[in-house]
Image (spheres, rainbow, N blue to C red):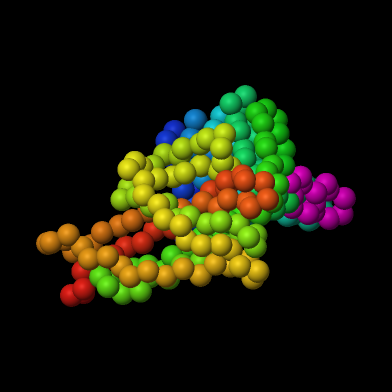
């Protein structure tokens, strides 16, 4: 997805963005590129958000954001144009406001935009006006499967992690609003019932390649959709961490 006109999420139970690019053109209203508000819950994976000149990339108001393997960069401030315009401060990367705002960050880059010339201030990567932000240590586990696939075709996927990590793939026929647990980092975005299988051990390269045959569809079905996430266990600490989601569409072999 490329949200070139900006993105506003209002009162959303769950929104998942994976491998997306968000930006707002300068001709638009002076707003954040990505506004999350009114009790929304958003999960962003491997995505990039950039603010328009002098504005923040992401504004979080009384909402929840899980930002894994992503970036939020404030827009550069405009230079002065004497005597008509003064210079503009750079925008912030992520701004939290509202006591219930909460951000969980992992392996993500938050950066402020440069201040305009001759002497305006640069923005900040993270600004917490109210609420809380937690930064997890370690790396994000990127996971992706090839899609679509016809019945019987080989489906391939990759899981990134630290060498020695144990990896499982969890999958379901429907997405879920987000399940958290003190036993793992991140949220599982799959609806019950959830099935899983052991995918293997992350090799020295840091990338585990997996493959399987696409299953046959139910009689009369033209397609089926499966939602999945990788879950990795650190061999040293025993801690589990949930990776990014990926969707597989299986098509009838006649297509």
Q: Would residue 173 appear left or right of 34 to someone viewing this image?
A: left
Q: Residue most toward the right? A: 119
Residue 60 location (% of width, % of height): 59, 37
Q: Residue most toward the top? A: 99
Q: Would residue 217 appear left or right of 139 to someone viewing this image?
A: left
Q: Kindly identify the residue that appears in the image at 57 percent across and 47 percent down.
A: 241
**Where 41 sits versus 234, above or below?**
above
The residue closer to the viewer here, 170 or 238, is 238
Q: Answer with the quarter of the image where residue 252 lies.
A: bottom left
For the C terminus, give its image quadrant. Answer: bottom left
Q: Would residue 119 appear left or right of 157 to someone viewing this image?
A: right
Dominant secondary structure of the residues highlighted in magenta in the image: loop
* Any part of residue 15 in sight: no
Residue 50 location (% of width, % of height): 63, 55
> Does the segment drawn in magenta span residue 121?
yes
Residue 48 location (% of width, % of height): 60, 57
* Residue interval drawn in magenta: 112-125
The residue closer to the viewer here, 164 or 109, is 164
């Amino acid at each position: 997805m490329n949200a070139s006109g900006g993105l506003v999420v209002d009162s959303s139970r769950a929104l998942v963005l994976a491998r997306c690019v968000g930006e707002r053109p300068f001709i638009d209203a002076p707003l954040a590129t990505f506004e999350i508000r009114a009790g929304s819950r958003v999960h962003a994976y491997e995505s990039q958000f950039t603010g328009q000149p002098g504005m923040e990339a992401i504004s979080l108001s009384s909402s929840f954001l899980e930002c894994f393997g992503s970036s939020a960069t404030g827009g550069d401030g405009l230079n002065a144009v004497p005597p008509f315009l003064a210079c503009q401060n750079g925008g912030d990367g992520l701004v939290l406001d509202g006591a219930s705002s909460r951000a969980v960050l992992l392996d993500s880059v938050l950066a402020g935009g440069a201040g305009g010339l001759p002497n305006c201030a640069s923005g900040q990567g993270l600004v917490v006006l109210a609420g809380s932000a937690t930064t997890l240590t370690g790396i994000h586990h990127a996971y992706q499967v090839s899609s679509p696939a016809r019945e019987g075709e080989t489906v391939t996927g990759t899981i990134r992690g630290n060498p020695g990590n144990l990896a499982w793939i969890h999958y379901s026929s429907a997405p879920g609003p987000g399940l958290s647990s003190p036993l793992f980092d991140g949220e599982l975005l799959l609806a019950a019932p959830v099935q899983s299988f052991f995918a293997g051990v992350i090799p020295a390269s840091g990338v585990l390649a997996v493959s399987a045959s696409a299953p046959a569809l139910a009689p009369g079905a033209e397609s089926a959709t499966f939602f999945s996430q990788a879950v990795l266990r650190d061999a040293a600490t025993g801690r589990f961490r949930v990776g990014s989601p990926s969707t597989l569409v299986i098509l009838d072999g006649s297509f």
